[in-house]
Image (cartoon, rainbow, N blue to C red):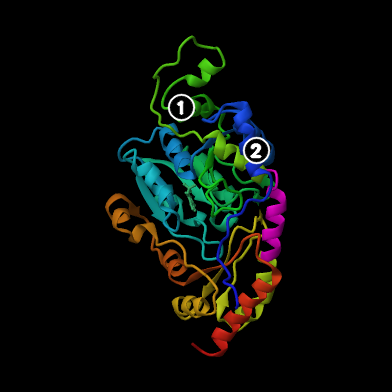
């Protein structure tokens, strides 16, 4: 019987479980221990950030960003609406107002040409979401941020080991966030990291991660007792997850190479459908080096949902992506829309993500593509 081709299959790739077993010898299972430090060093070395704090999710890292840049009620923060809910919710939790601008139809990242008109006296920052691990065009974003004295936060949830020009993503904004959720290239079930490039945030970020206490100074014998000194929450990642994550990080480059090979194969096999104007394939601008996080197609003539159904019958699991935040119930209550959302709506209605994970073999990719061709041949 033909087996199912899954959209994602999170895997154990190395010595994740052996690392976890080592913890019984080490005897430290909560956050900020031996494996947290190894992951921290790996992240600093491979992303070029100044400091890296492991946290329990990218959502947690985004919430820390909102506290760090002192978001107050009615402060505005510019971002795409085509993103995951946490990008916006982290700021709404502090009383902030997400201000949505449309995306560039080529990359599905925030359109830098539309940012300036969204800036007001209340604007505090710009969140650059690197969709599908493909970099936003950072130079114009940084230029605008400098002109209006705004913070830049990279939501690099999907973008570990991608680059903008020669710079690793996560090393460009004042702050950046990564996700290690099981759907990401590198995972530990649930996990994330806050990457810090602006040194003024380092000390306070550690306090915020430790429930608003100066426990970090206490651990370094710099204070006699630790105490409540600021806002904070329990944002740390347990050593159990960090031990697992370190096993994955050690394989990160190999995983990325494998994912990029699958991406390239899809891209080659689907070329003819783009020539026939039945689909549009992803655009990877020359300024970015991507990480093979996702392979998507934009299906023309409103056929996306029919194609999902067709592929499901053929035992191929494909999925759409974000419901734009500006059209969601809470988005309508809490956010401002600053541009027409034509490209955002188009992506939401027509984008289809194809199976991509490290257990996928070339034959699976050709089966997926053959079935996409047969869908269009049969004029469904
Ligand atoms: C762009 C973006 N930001 C933030 C998140 C939240 O990540 P996490 O599940 O680690 O909180 C996601 C999750 O998929 C995401 O895609």
Can see residue 109?
A: yes
What residue is shown with label 1?
Answer: 210
Is residue 361 left or right of 71 when viewed as pictured?
A: right
* Residue 226 vertical placement versus 151 (above, below): above
Picture disc at residue 19: 2
Is residue 262 left or right of 319 when viewed as pictured?
A: right
Residue 122 locus on image (x, y percent): 35, 40
Residue 146 locus on image (x, y percent): 52, 39
Sequence order check, earlier mark of 2 and 1: 2
Residue 264 locus on image (x, y percent): 69, 67
Membership of 253 in magenta stretch: yes
Mark 2 residue's CB less than 8 Å from ligand 1: no
As drawn, the residue found furthest toward the left would be 333
Dot 2: what SS? helix
Picture disc at residue 321: none
**Which secondary structure class fits the magenta region best?**
helix
Front residue of 223/251: it is 251
Pointer 2: residues within 10 angstroms few (<14), some, or many (20+)? Answer: many
């Amino acid at each position: 019987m033909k087996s199912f081709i899954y959209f994602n299959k999170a895997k154990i790739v190395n010595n994740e479980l052996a690392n976890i077993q080592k913890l019984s010898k080490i005897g430290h299972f909560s956050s900020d221990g031996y494996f947290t430090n190894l992951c921290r060093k790996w992240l600093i070395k491979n992303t070029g950030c100044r400091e890296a704090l492991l946290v329990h999710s990218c959502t947690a890292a985004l919430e820390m960003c909102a506290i760090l840049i002192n978001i107050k009620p009615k402060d505005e923060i510019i971002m795409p609406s085509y993103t995951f809910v946490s990008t916006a919710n982290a700021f709404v939790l502090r009383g902030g107002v997400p201000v949505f601008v449309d995306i560039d139809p080529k990359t599905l990242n925030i359109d830098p040409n539309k940012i300036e008109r969204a800036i007001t006296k209340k604007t505090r920052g710009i969140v650059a979401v690197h969709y599908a691990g493909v970099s936003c065009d950072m130079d114009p974003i940084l230029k605008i941020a400098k002109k209006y004295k705004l913070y830049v936060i990279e939501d690099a949830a999907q973008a570990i080991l991608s680059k903008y020009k020669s710079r690793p993503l996560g090393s460009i904004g004042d702050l950046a966030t990564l996700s290690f959720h099981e759907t990401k290239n590198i995972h530990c079930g649930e996990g994330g990291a806050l990457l810090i490039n602006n040194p003024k945030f380092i000390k306070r970020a550690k306090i915020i991660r430790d429930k608003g206490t100066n426990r970090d100074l206490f651990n370094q014998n710099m204070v006699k007792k630790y105490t409540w000194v600021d806002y904070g929450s329990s944002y740390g990642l347990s050593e159990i997850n960090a031990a697992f994550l370190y096993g994955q990080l050690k394989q990160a480059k190999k995983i990325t190479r494998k994912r990029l090979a699958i991406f390239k194969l899809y891209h080659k096999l689907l070329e003819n459908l783009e020539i026939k104007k039945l689909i549009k394939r992803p655009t990877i601008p020359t300024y970015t080096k991507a990480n093979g996080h996702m392979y998507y197609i934009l299906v023309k003539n409103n056929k996306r949902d029919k194609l999902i159904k067709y592929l499901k019958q053929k035992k191929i699991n494909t999925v759409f992506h974000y419901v734009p935040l500006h059209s969601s119930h809470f988005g309508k209550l809490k956010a401002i829309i600053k541009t027409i959302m034509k490209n955002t709506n188009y992506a939401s209605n027509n984008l289809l993500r194809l199976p991509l994970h490290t257990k996928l073999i070339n034959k699976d990719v050709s089966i997926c593509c053959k079935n996409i061709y047969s869908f269009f041949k049969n004029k469904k």
